[in-house]
Image (tube, rainbow, N blue to C red):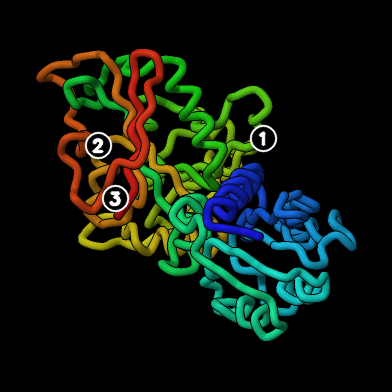
Protein backbone atom coordinates (compact mmCIF):
# COMPACT_ATOMS: atom_id res chain seq x y z
CA UNK A 1 0.00 0.00 0.00
CA UNK A 2 1.28 3.47 -0.87
CA UNK A 3 0.23 7.00 -0.07
CA UNK A 4 1.25 10.49 -1.05
CA UNK A 5 3.76 10.81 1.80
CA UNK A 6 5.42 7.54 0.84
CA UNK A 7 5.53 8.52 -2.82
CA UNK A 8 7.12 11.83 -1.91
CA UNK A 9 9.72 10.10 0.25
CA UNK A 10 10.83 7.73 -2.49
CA UNK A 11 10.69 10.30 -5.27
CA UNK A 12 12.89 12.61 -3.18
CA UNK A 13 15.35 9.73 -2.81
CA UNK A 14 15.10 9.07 -6.53
CA UNK A 15 15.96 12.69 -7.33
CA UNK A 16 18.92 12.63 -4.94
CA UNK A 17 20.16 9.53 -6.70
CA UNK A 18 19.87 11.17 -10.12
CA UNK A 19 21.98 14.16 -9.01
CA UNK A 20 25.02 11.94 -8.55
CA UNK A 21 25.60 11.78 -12.31
CA UNK A 22 24.40 15.26 -13.23
CA UNK A 23 26.71 16.61 -15.92
CA UNK A 24 28.21 13.17 -16.66
CA UNK A 25 25.59 11.65 -18.98
CA UNK A 26 26.44 13.46 -22.24
CA UNK A 27 23.31 14.55 -24.13
CA UNK A 28 21.03 12.30 -22.07
CA UNK A 29 19.54 13.51 -18.79
CA UNK A 30 20.67 11.99 -15.51
CA UNK A 31 17.63 10.00 -14.40
CA UNK A 32 17.11 8.09 -11.16
CA UNK A 33 15.04 4.94 -10.70
CA UNK A 34 14.03 3.09 -7.53
CA UNK A 35 12.11 -0.20 -7.53
CA UNK A 36 10.21 -0.64 -4.28
CA UNK A 37 8.35 -3.66 -2.99
CA UNK A 38 5.67 -3.21 -0.32
CA UNK A 39 5.47 -6.27 1.92
CA UNK A 40 2.92 -6.00 4.74
CA UNK A 41 2.87 -2.25 4.03
CA UNK A 42 6.62 -2.05 4.74
CA UNK A 43 8.53 -0.63 1.75
CA UNK A 44 11.84 -2.11 0.66
CA UNK A 45 14.07 -0.92 -2.18
CA UNK A 46 14.89 -3.95 -4.35
CA UNK A 47 16.63 -2.15 -7.20
CA UNK A 48 18.11 1.26 -7.94
CA UNK A 49 19.76 2.84 -10.93
CA UNK A 50 21.15 6.08 -12.31
CA UNK A 51 21.73 6.86 -15.97
CA UNK A 52 25.27 5.60 -16.50
CA UNK A 53 28.15 7.95 -17.23
CA UNK A 54 28.11 8.72 -20.92
CA UNK A 55 24.32 8.28 -21.08
CA UNK A 56 23.92 4.48 -21.38
CA UNK A 57 22.51 2.24 -20.03
CA UNK A 58 19.45 4.04 -18.73
CA UNK A 59 18.51 4.08 -15.06
CA UNK A 60 15.46 1.82 -15.43
CA UNK A 61 17.47 -1.03 -16.93
CA UNK A 62 20.13 -0.82 -14.22
CA UNK A 63 17.46 -0.95 -11.50
CA UNK A 64 15.67 -3.87 -13.18
CA UNK A 65 18.91 -5.85 -13.54
CA UNK A 66 19.67 -5.26 -9.86
CA UNK A 67 16.18 -6.29 -8.74
CA UNK A 68 15.88 -9.40 -10.90
CA UNK A 69 12.70 -11.35 -10.09
CA UNK A 70 11.94 -8.95 -7.24
CA UNK A 71 10.91 -6.32 -9.80
CA UNK A 72 7.63 -8.18 -10.38
CA UNK A 73 4.80 -6.36 -8.63
CA UNK A 74 7.07 -3.50 -7.54
CA UNK A 75 6.46 0.23 -7.76
CA UNK A 76 8.97 2.03 -9.96
CA UNK A 77 9.87 5.61 -9.04
CA UNK A 78 11.45 7.32 -12.06
CA UNK A 79 12.44 10.98 -12.21
CA UNK A 80 11.60 11.23 -15.93
CA UNK A 81 9.13 9.36 -18.12
CA UNK A 82 10.65 6.08 -19.38
CA UNK A 83 11.68 6.25 -23.03
CA UNK A 84 9.36 4.82 -25.66
CA UNK A 85 11.57 4.76 -28.77
CA UNK A 86 13.65 1.92 -30.16
CA UNK A 87 17.39 2.35 -30.55
CA UNK A 88 19.98 -0.37 -30.21
CA UNK A 89 17.78 -1.69 -27.38
CA UNK A 90 14.05 -1.79 -26.73
CA UNK A 91 12.39 1.12 -24.86
CA UNK A 92 12.72 1.41 -21.09
CA UNK A 93 8.93 1.46 -20.87
CA UNK A 94 8.91 -2.02 -22.44
CA UNK A 95 11.64 -3.15 -20.04
CA UNK A 96 9.43 -2.16 -17.09
CA UNK A 97 6.49 -4.00 -18.65
CA UNK A 98 8.58 -7.12 -19.23
CA UNK A 99 9.86 -6.96 -15.63
CA UNK A 100 6.27 -7.07 -14.36
CA UNK A 101 6.18 -3.86 -12.33
CA UNK A 102 2.72 -3.00 -11.05
CA UNK A 103 2.95 0.78 -10.73
CA UNK A 104 5.12 3.58 -12.10
CA UNK A 105 5.45 7.02 -10.48
CA UNK A 106 7.25 9.72 -12.49
CA UNK A 107 8.05 13.37 -11.90
CA UNK A 108 8.04 14.66 -15.48
CA UNK A 109 6.77 13.73 -18.92
CA UNK A 110 9.76 13.58 -21.27
CA UNK A 111 9.39 16.43 -23.83
CA UNK A 112 11.53 14.58 -26.40
CA UNK A 113 9.23 14.19 -29.42
CA UNK A 114 10.10 10.49 -29.56
CA UNK A 115 8.62 10.08 -26.07
CA UNK A 116 6.31 12.92 -24.90
CA UNK A 117 3.69 10.74 -23.21
CA UNK A 118 4.25 7.63 -25.33
CA UNK A 119 6.16 5.90 -22.53
CA UNK A 120 3.32 6.50 -20.09
CA UNK A 121 0.81 5.31 -22.70
CA UNK A 122 2.72 2.04 -23.24
CA UNK A 123 2.72 1.35 -19.52
CA UNK A 124 -0.99 2.08 -19.15
CA UNK A 125 -1.83 -0.11 -22.15
CA UNK A 126 -0.04 -2.96 -20.39
CA UNK A 127 -2.27 -2.52 -17.33
CA UNK A 128 0.32 -0.73 -15.20
CA UNK A 129 -0.86 2.08 -12.93
CA UNK A 130 0.89 5.33 -13.89
CA UNK A 131 1.03 8.49 -11.80
CA UNK A 132 3.05 11.53 -12.80
CA UNK A 133 3.88 14.92 -11.31
CA UNK A 134 5.29 13.71 -7.99
CA UNK A 135 8.34 15.88 -7.23
CA UNK A 136 7.84 17.85 -10.44
CA UNK A 137 9.11 21.18 -9.10
CA UNK A 138 12.43 19.85 -7.82
CA UNK A 139 12.83 17.55 -10.80
CA UNK A 140 12.21 20.51 -13.08
CA UNK A 141 15.15 22.32 -11.46
CA UNK A 142 17.37 19.24 -11.58
CA UNK A 143 16.50 18.45 -15.21
CA UNK A 144 16.48 22.12 -16.20
CA UNK A 145 19.26 21.72 -18.77
CA UNK A 146 17.66 18.80 -20.56
CA UNK A 147 14.15 20.29 -20.44
CA UNK A 148 15.36 23.66 -21.71
CA UNK A 149 17.22 22.09 -24.59
CA UNK A 150 14.12 20.16 -25.63
CA UNK A 151 11.47 22.82 -24.96
CA UNK A 152 13.33 26.10 -25.62
CA UNK A 153 16.13 24.95 -27.91
CA UNK A 154 18.77 26.48 -25.66
CA UNK A 155 20.77 25.57 -22.54
CA UNK A 156 19.56 26.25 -19.02
CA UNK A 157 21.35 29.47 -18.03
CA UNK A 158 22.59 30.15 -14.52
CA UNK A 159 23.82 33.69 -13.92
CA UNK A 160 26.34 33.80 -11.09
CA UNK A 161 27.24 37.14 -9.55
CA UNK A 162 29.42 38.00 -6.55
CA UNK A 163 28.44 41.40 -5.18
CA UNK A 164 29.49 43.59 -2.29
CA UNK A 165 27.25 44.61 0.59
CA UNK A 166 26.48 47.82 -1.30
CA UNK A 167 25.61 46.05 -4.56
CA UNK A 168 28.86 46.46 -6.50
CA UNK A 169 30.77 43.95 -8.62
CA UNK A 170 34.19 45.53 -8.06
CA UNK A 171 36.23 48.51 -9.22
CA UNK A 172 37.56 48.79 -12.77
CA UNK A 173 41.27 48.03 -12.89
CA UNK A 174 41.46 46.82 -9.29
CA UNK A 175 41.33 43.35 -7.79
CA UNK A 176 38.94 43.32 -4.83
CA UNK A 177 38.12 40.27 -2.72
CA UNK A 178 34.34 40.24 -2.34
CA UNK A 179 33.60 36.72 -1.09
CA UNK A 180 35.45 34.16 1.02
CA UNK A 181 37.16 30.88 0.17
CA UNK A 182 34.01 29.01 1.25
CA UNK A 183 31.97 30.83 -1.39
CA UNK A 184 34.67 30.25 -4.00
CA UNK A 185 34.58 26.51 -3.29
CA UNK A 186 30.84 26.54 -3.85
CA UNK A 187 31.34 28.31 -7.20
CA UNK A 188 33.79 25.58 -8.23
CA UNK A 189 31.16 22.96 -7.40
CA UNK A 190 28.61 24.87 -9.47
CA UNK A 191 31.04 24.83 -12.39
CA UNK A 192 31.32 21.05 -12.09
CA UNK A 193 27.53 20.76 -12.47
CA UNK A 194 27.40 22.70 -15.76
CA UNK A 195 28.32 21.71 -19.29
CA UNK A 196 29.77 25.10 -20.15
CA UNK A 197 30.82 28.43 -18.66
CA UNK A 198 30.80 31.83 -20.37
CA UNK A 199 32.44 35.20 -19.77
CA UNK A 200 33.07 38.33 -21.79
CA UNK A 201 36.45 39.39 -23.16
CA UNK A 202 36.53 42.21 -20.62
CA UNK A 203 36.50 39.75 -17.73
CA UNK A 204 39.39 37.84 -19.27
CA UNK A 205 41.40 41.02 -19.74
CA UNK A 206 40.70 42.27 -16.22
CA UNK A 207 40.97 39.04 -14.21
CA UNK A 208 42.70 36.44 -16.43
CA UNK A 209 40.54 33.67 -14.93
CA UNK A 210 40.99 29.92 -15.38
CA UNK A 211 37.24 29.10 -15.14
CA UNK A 212 38.00 25.53 -14.10
CA UNK A 213 36.85 23.34 -11.23
CA UNK A 214 39.76 23.03 -8.84
CA UNK A 215 38.13 21.06 -6.02
CA UNK A 216 39.87 17.84 -5.02
CA UNK A 217 38.38 14.93 -6.95
CA UNK A 218 36.43 17.15 -9.36
CA UNK A 219 39.24 18.53 -11.51
CA UNK A 220 38.06 16.46 -14.47
CA UNK A 221 34.60 18.06 -14.23
CA UNK A 222 35.65 21.47 -15.54
CA UNK A 223 33.06 22.76 -18.04
CA UNK A 224 33.80 23.84 -21.59
CA UNK A 225 34.82 27.51 -21.61
CA UNK A 226 33.38 30.21 -23.88
CA UNK A 227 34.50 33.81 -24.32
CA UNK A 228 32.33 36.47 -25.99
CA UNK A 229 34.94 38.15 -28.19
CA UNK A 230 33.57 39.74 -31.37
CA UNK A 231 36.98 40.55 -32.84
CA UNK A 232 38.74 37.35 -31.71
CA UNK A 233 41.45 39.24 -29.84
CA UNK A 234 41.79 36.87 -26.89
CA UNK A 235 45.41 36.88 -25.74
CA UNK A 236 47.27 33.67 -26.53
CA UNK A 237 49.05 34.17 -23.19
CA UNK A 238 45.83 34.22 -21.17
CA UNK A 239 45.18 31.32 -18.80
CA UNK A 240 42.20 30.30 -20.91
CA UNK A 241 44.27 30.00 -24.07
CA UNK A 242 47.20 28.33 -22.32
CA UNK A 243 44.87 25.72 -20.83
CA UNK A 244 42.85 25.04 -23.98
CA UNK A 245 44.50 21.66 -24.58
CA UNK A 246 43.26 20.48 -21.20
CA UNK A 247 39.79 22.09 -21.14
CA UNK A 248 37.95 22.88 -24.41
CA UNK A 249 38.02 26.64 -24.91
CA UNK A 250 35.96 28.54 -27.49
CA UNK A 251 36.08 32.11 -28.73
CA UNK A 252 32.61 33.29 -29.76
CA UNK A 253 33.28 35.66 -32.61
CA UNK A 254 31.93 37.10 -35.86
CA UNK A 255 35.33 36.48 -37.46
CA UNK A 256 35.65 33.64 -39.95
CA UNK A 257 38.83 32.32 -38.34
CA UNK A 258 41.00 32.76 -35.27
CA UNK A 259 44.50 34.23 -35.18
CA UNK A 260 47.25 31.68 -35.76
CA UNK A 261 48.60 31.90 -32.21
CA UNK A 262 45.20 30.91 -30.77
CA UNK A 263 44.80 28.05 -33.24
CA UNK A 264 48.23 26.77 -32.20
CA UNK A 265 46.99 26.72 -28.60
CA UNK A 266 43.98 24.58 -29.68
CA UNK A 267 41.51 27.38 -28.96
CA UNK A 268 38.36 26.79 -31.02
CA UNK A 269 36.23 29.23 -32.99
CA UNK A 270 32.51 29.33 -32.16
CA UNK A 271 31.12 31.29 -35.09
CA UNK A 272 28.34 33.75 -34.31
CA UNK A 273 26.17 36.35 -36.00
CA UNK A 274 25.59 39.97 -35.06
CA UNK A 275 22.40 41.78 -34.13
CA UNK A 276 22.48 45.57 -33.78
CA UNK A 277 26.25 45.40 -33.82
CA UNK A 278 26.48 42.91 -30.95
CA UNK A 279 26.84 39.15 -30.78
CA UNK A 280 23.40 37.56 -31.13
CA UNK A 281 22.94 35.72 -27.83
CA UNK A 282 19.75 33.75 -28.68
CA UNK A 283 21.38 32.27 -31.78
CA UNK A 284 24.55 31.49 -29.83
CA UNK A 285 22.53 29.54 -27.27
CA UNK A 286 20.66 27.69 -30.02
CA UNK A 287 23.98 26.59 -31.49
CA UNK A 288 25.18 25.50 -28.06
CA UNK A 289 22.06 23.38 -27.64
CA UNK A 290 22.66 21.85 -31.07
CA UNK A 291 26.09 20.75 -29.86
CA UNK A 292 24.48 19.02 -26.82
CA UNK A 293 25.29 21.73 -24.27
CA UNK A 294 22.37 21.60 -21.83
CA UNK A 295 23.54 23.89 -19.02
CA UNK A 296 25.50 27.14 -19.15
CA UNK A 297 26.93 29.12 -16.26
CA UNK A 298 27.44 32.81 -17.01
CA UNK A 299 30.20 34.37 -14.92
CA UNK A 300 30.74 37.48 -16.99
CA UNK A 301 30.90 41.03 -15.73
CA UNK A 302 28.17 43.65 -15.55
CA UNK A 303 27.72 44.08 -19.31
CA UNK A 304 27.46 40.37 -20.06
CA UNK A 305 25.06 39.83 -17.16
CA UNK A 306 22.93 42.76 -18.27
CA UNK A 307 22.85 41.47 -21.86
CA UNK A 308 21.59 38.04 -20.80
CA UNK A 309 18.97 39.55 -18.50
CA UNK A 310 17.71 42.01 -21.10
CA UNK A 311 17.46 39.20 -23.66
CA UNK A 312 15.39 37.20 -21.13
CA UNK A 313 17.81 34.29 -21.33
CA UNK A 314 18.42 33.67 -17.60
CA UNK A 315 16.71 30.77 -15.82
CA UNK A 316 18.46 30.87 -12.46
CA UNK A 317 20.39 33.53 -10.56
CA UNK A 318 23.00 32.58 -7.97
CA UNK A 319 23.72 35.73 -5.97
CA UNK A 320 26.72 35.64 -3.63
CA UNK A 321 26.84 38.67 -1.35
CA UNK A 322 29.92 39.46 0.71
CA UNK A 323 30.36 41.83 3.68
CA UNK A 324 32.69 44.24 1.85
CA UNK A 325 31.50 47.77 1.05
CA UNK A 326 33.09 49.16 -2.13
CA UNK A 327 31.63 52.64 -2.44
CA UNK A 328 30.82 55.04 -5.25
CA UNK A 329 33.72 53.98 -7.48
CA UNK A 330 32.31 50.47 -7.69
CA UNK A 331 30.69 48.93 -10.75
CA UNK A 332 26.96 48.51 -10.00
CA UNK A 333 25.57 45.01 -10.27
CA UNK A 334 22.74 44.73 -12.81
CA UNK A 335 20.73 42.87 -10.15
CA UNK A 336 20.58 42.84 -6.36
CA UNK A 337 18.39 40.72 -4.12
CA UNK A 338 16.08 43.61 -3.23
CA UNK A 339 15.49 44.66 -6.84
CA UNK A 340 14.80 41.55 -8.90
CA UNK A 341 12.20 41.22 -11.62
CA UNK A 342 8.97 39.58 -10.50
CA UNK A 343 9.73 36.78 -12.95
CA UNK A 344 12.23 35.43 -10.39
CA UNK A 345 11.51 34.04 -6.96
CA UNK A 346 13.83 33.24 -4.06
CA UNK A 347 13.93 29.47 -3.55
CA UNK A 348 16.93 28.95 -1.31
CA UNK A 349 19.28 30.92 0.92
CA UNK A 350 22.51 29.79 2.59
CA UNK A 351 24.91 31.46 5.00
CA UNK A 352 28.54 30.78 4.07
CA UNK A 353 30.58 32.30 6.86
CA UNK A 354 30.36 36.04 6.30
CA UNK A 355 28.78 35.56 2.85
CA UNK A 356 25.24 34.79 1.77
CA UNK A 357 24.14 32.72 -1.21
CA UNK A 358 20.66 33.31 -2.61
CA UNK A 359 19.23 31.16 -5.39
CA UNK A 360 16.47 32.68 -7.51
CA UNK A 361 14.55 30.65 -10.08
CA UNK A 362 12.48 31.90 -12.97
CA UNK A 363 8.82 31.63 -12.07
Dot 2 lies on which element? helix
Q: Residues within 10 Å of mark 2 (few under 14, many from 20)?
A: many
User: Is residue 278 found left or right of 126 in the rendered image?
Assistant: left
Dot 3 lies on which element? helix
**What's the residue at 68%, 27% (across, down)?**
217
Q: Quadrant of the N terminus?
A: bottom right
Q: Residues within 10 Å of mark 1 (few under 14, many from 20)?
A: some
Q: Quadrant of the C terminus?
A: bottom left
Sequence order check, earlier mark of 1 and 2: 1
**What's the residue at 21%, 38% (across, down)?**
335
**What's the residue at 35%, 31% (across, down)?**
349
Residue designated by label 3: 308
Which corner quadrant of the image does residue 92 belong to? bottom right
Task: Kindly indicate whether the residue at mark 2 contacts the one at mark 1 (C-beta within 8 angstroms).
Answer: no
In this view, the residue in front, 363 or 262, is: 363
Q: Is residue 206 visible?
A: no
Dot 1 lies on which element? helix
Image height of 256 relative to 12, above or below = below
User: Is residue 166 found left or right of 104 in the rendered image?
Assistant: left
Image height of 155 relative to 260, above or below = below
Specify the label residue 7 is tagged with. Answer: none
Alpha-carbon distance for marks 1 and 2?
29 Å
Task: Kindly indicate whether the residue at mark 2 contacts the one at mark 3 (C-beta within 8 angstroms).
Answer: no
Image height of 116 relative to 354, above or below = below
- The x, y position of residue 199, in whole percent, is 39, 40
- The x, y position of residue 132, in whole percent, is 53, 67
Residue designated by label 2: 302
- The x, y position of residue 345, in whole percent, is 27, 46
In this view, the residue in front, 126 or 152, is: 126
Amino acid sequence: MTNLKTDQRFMDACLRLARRHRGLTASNPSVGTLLVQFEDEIPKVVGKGITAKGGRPHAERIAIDQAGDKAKGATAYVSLEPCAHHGATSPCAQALIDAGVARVVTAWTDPDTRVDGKGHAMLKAAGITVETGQGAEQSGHDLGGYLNRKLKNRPYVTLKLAISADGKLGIAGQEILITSSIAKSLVHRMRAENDAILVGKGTVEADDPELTCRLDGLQNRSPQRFVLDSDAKLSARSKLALGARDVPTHVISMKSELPKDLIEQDVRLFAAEAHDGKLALPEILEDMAASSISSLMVEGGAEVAKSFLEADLVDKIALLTGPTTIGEKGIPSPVVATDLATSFTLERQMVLGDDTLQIFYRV
